[in-house]
Image (cartoon, coloured by chain):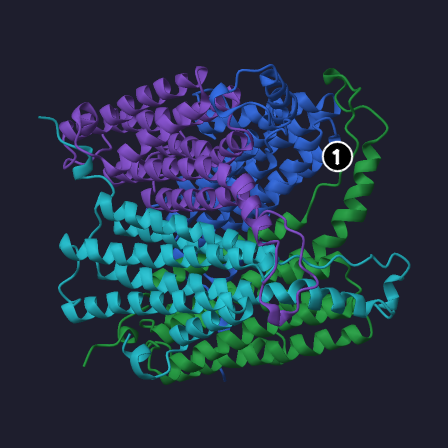
Chain colours: A purple, B blue, C cyan, D green
Amino acid sequence: MPISYHRFAGSSLDRLAALSDGVFAVAMTLLVLDLKPPSVPKRAQSPIWSGGHGGSEHALVHGLLHNVAPRLLPYAMSFLTLGIFWVGQQTQLESFTRSTRALTWIHLTFLLSVTLMPFSTGLLAQDTTYRVAMAVYWLNLLGLGVLLHISLHYADRAGLIRAETTAEMRAALKRRIVVYQVLYALATLTCLINTYLAIGLLVALQLNSVIAPRIGILDRA
Amino acid sequence: MPISYHRFAGSSLDRLAALSDGVFAVAMTLLVLDLKPPSVPKRAQSPIWSGGHGGSEHALVHGLLHNVAPRLLPYAMSFLTLGIFWVGQQTQLESFTRSTRALTWIHLTFLLSVTLMPFSTGLLAQDTTYRVAMAVYWLNLLGLGVLLHISLHYADRAGLIRAETTAEMRAALKRRIVVYQVLYALATLTCLINTYLAIGLLVALQLNSVIAPRIGILDRA
Amino acid sequence: MPISYHRFAGSSLDRLAALSDGVFAVAMTLLVLDLKPPSVPKRAQSPIWSGGHGGSEHALVHGLLHNVAPRLLPYAMSFLTLGIFWVGQQTQLESFTRSTRALTWIHLTFLLSVTLMPFSTGLLAQDTTYRVAMAVYWLNLLGLGVLLHISLHYADRAGLIRAETTAEMRAALKRRIVVYQVLYALATLTCLINTYLAIGLLVALQLNSVIAPRIGILDRA
Amino acid sequence: MPISYHRFAGSSLDRLAALSDGVFAVAMTLLVLDLKPPSVPKRAQSPIWSGGHGGSEHALVHGLLHNVAPRLLPYAMSFLTLGIFWVGQQTQLESFTRSTRALTWIHLTFLLSVTLMPFSTGLLAQDTTYRVAMAVYWLNLLGLGVLLHISLHYADRAGLIRAETTAEMRAALKRRIVVYQVLYALATLTCLINTYLAIGLLVALQLNSVIAPRIGILDRA
């Protein structure tokens, strides 16, 4: 009986980590492509030595405040999101002994969600008042969380987690994902009242996740 | 007699793996550039506190369903394709003892096919009913498979494969490529009847390749 | 009491280095997207064998000189900047024993500044005479420096620096950042007189930082 | 006397290799952005089950042949070029014992030339009959070669080359760069007769560099 491809394919954690770093790096940098310098009429007349003395300086300021600034919030939120999930995935991969083909595909699907982040962000940045855009963004967040949870669950059952990562630590990792996903969902629901409120709450949650002040349940999560 | 450059150039498998991860990561993320948020008229009137109550919410839903959704299928199919060939290439590189300049160039040509994937996908996503676009996409798939087969064949003859990779495993790797390429070709041929049928069959094949249910010849391949 | 996620998350320096290399690589290459070939009317008439004999050759030269050349200066300046901060960050990471979640987030914020560089550069390249664009560019430079300084300061206090990196070397690293940031600020201030002067001084500072001639305080910094 | 930053900064070959792989990967994949699917009128009428039976299939073929095909030659040539110089740089880095800040900056300047390749290629692909575009492309090629030569020369004098890399091998590496640069210059000069001839000769040279048939001086180079 011939040996199956599935027995030995896709077992390198190093390659998976390297591909992930690449996808995250590109997705993080592509976010900025959404920030376009406001087009200001070129001051053709101004001689090189005049060095910018003129009246249209505030046209650029206006363009920055009205066209670029509103996009900064969704952009920063998405960078935070990608950073949070990059740290989360890194922590998981560090705790695995090796990969399998199934685990590799769980993470490839996770990376698919990562590549969708610039799209979801662009949709939200275009006009922050659309609740549909908010829902799409939340689905993307949900996908990232669900896939990391599946990865942990699978690796746990398949015996791919290092002995140093105690059952307590595994529980901490899973609990953290669930608690934050519930909070993300609740924050997103407030867009029924106001989308700015929803985005504000999401950013607050992410900053809490990053800065991690010691308060109650969120600390322990 | 002077020593030849070809004797010692390009022998690092690590660098080849790193370049490959980079090319795959960029190609996977570039696919998403094809997904553009549908442009919806900015609701200039809506004050910040109104939070998106309005009538044009369904205009965005319409844009998403008619302009974005049809592109999701070719996009997901291409992400699956890139994932499959990334796993395939990784499995090969892991089984080599070292690289040579010739092997490096086989893989650079393979990476050239990888970089063409966003183009082929864009062509297909533009209008899925064109059989010419279908043929271009299939040529791209064929190129990926043929180059991986050449790589394996060359490495085998040049004695670059680890002892742990038995003759049986090498045969499994080659068989898998051939079987899937034949099935890809047959699936593509059904575009003579209907292009949606062809794409559906290709996606089914790729999902089978990923999820790998235990059925007949495909299991053993 | 459950163990906290913050105790063991994000401690891999290798992953942080890999993500950083990815972000820098993409940001450096995206800069060039700003350089667009000037559009010249296609010479439809010219037969393949005429090989370009014609009168419109100087139209392309004109386009290159007027549309591309002025963008080369901000582009080269930004590539230098990214190179300088890449070397600076690499030197720091090499001197750390390991990372912590806090240190990882300091560097993620640093990478956020890196991804903003193509935007700031594009703003400046669009019309070099705007002092507002100059100020935005300087803020970006400042962010990069401040975050590297915070990283060093934090790692020092948290005991994450290798024993081989003496107190003297740590002081040298910090001094260098401060001296250059002061000089960057002074150079930027000259844009009140003339923006070209400011850019010229910034480029001179960066070339000094790269080529490092042995002159006075800058040498010791 | 305070220690100088230049003594210990930028000495990691691994980080330099990783950044280089990233820049090459992005540049290689960005080349393809120049290949745009020809826009064909969407066949709005065709029902989903008709599967592409219609008369406009040849409009897409026409678009591919007239708008995409002419760009394939410069695109493939640039991919070959990037591959050749990636192999060349990899071979050098593998033969170094460590990096210094100066060597790192030589390679950063080399990477700057790499990032310019998509621009030079786009310029040439726009209209292949312009000799000015040809000259810009050649300058880019020249920059890549000159910087690799400087790198080798510097590393040799600074004693950074491994003992295993004999003087004979170093000479082989340098000779190869010089011989090919002379041939590139001669090939480019033929654009005075016809630009297609020049491109054809460049591609022939690159294929020879890759496939390396055993003929005369080129073999020994």
Is residue B102 found left or right of D130 in the rendered image?
Answer: left
Q: Which image quadrant for residue C49?
A: bottom right
Locate residue A67, reporting x and y percent.
56, 40
Question: In front: C128, or C205?
Answer: C128
**A178 relative to C35, above or below:** above
Q: Residue at x 52, y 69 (%)?
A: C193
Q: Chain of mark 1?
A: B
Locate residue C221, reporting x and y percent.
29, 74
The residue that mark 1 highlights is: B132
**D132 relative to D121, above or below:** below
Q: Which image quadrant for residue C56?
A: bottom right
**A70 relative to D208, above or below:** above
Q: Residue at x 60, y 55 (%)?
A: C34
Q: Count neighbours of disc 1 (C-alpha within 10 A) and say few if under 14, some if 14 to 19, many if 20 or more.
A: many
Can residue D200 be seen here? The reply is no
How many numbered dots are placed on residues in this image? 1
- In the rendered image, the residue lying farthest to the front is A55
Locate residue D26, reporting x and y percent.
52, 53
Can residue C4 be seen here? The reply is yes
Question: In front: C164, or B82?
Answer: C164
Locate residue A46, reporting x and y percent.
66, 65
Q: Give the structural element (helix, strand or loop) at label 1.
A: helix
Amino acid on which disc 1 is placed: Val
